[in-house]
């Protein structure tokens, strides 16, 4: 959690490392009051891609 909070790794990377489904990991972050915002566009893109995969959406079907 400290790596996510410090911005060292993205939420998507932390979710994979933790081995949790994305919704459970997001709930955990929320319960710990760890914000999801990222100032790094690469991290935001990675997080968005992970959310799209979880939702079963084709990344190219939705434009950002």
Image: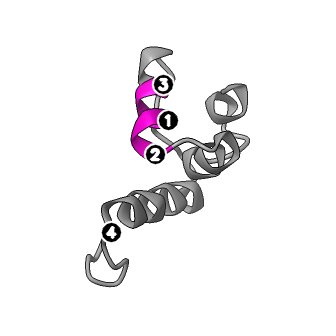
Looking at the rendered structure, the secondary structure element under dot 4 is loop
**Segment colored magenta:** 21-29
Residue bearing mark 1: 25
Residue bearing mark 4: 56
Q: Residue at the bottom extreme?
A: 60
Q: Callout 3: few (<14), some (14-19), or many (20+) C-alpha neighbours within 10 Å?
A: some
Quarter of the figure with the C terminus: bottom left
Q: Residue at the left extreme?
A: 62
- Residue 60 x/y as whole percent: 34, 84
Callouts 3 and 1 close, C-beta under 8 Å: yes
| Residue situated in front as seen by the camera: 42 or 46 | 46
Looking at the rendered structure, the secondary structure element under dot 1 is helix
Q: In this view, does 42 lie to the left or right of 62?
A: right
- Residue 48 x/y as whole percent: 42, 59
Magenta stretch: includes residue 23:
yes
- Which residue is at a point 73% across and 41% down the rendered structure image? 8
Residue bearing mark 2: 22
């Amino acid at each position: 959690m400290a790596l996510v909070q410090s911005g060292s790794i993205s939420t998507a990377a932390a979710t994979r490392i933790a081995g949790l489904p994305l919704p459970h990991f997001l709930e955990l972050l929320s319960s710990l009051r760890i914000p999801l915002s990222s100032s790094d566009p690469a991290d935001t893109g990675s997080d968005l891609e992970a959310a799209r995969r979880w939702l079963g959406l084709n990344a190219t079907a939705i434009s950002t």
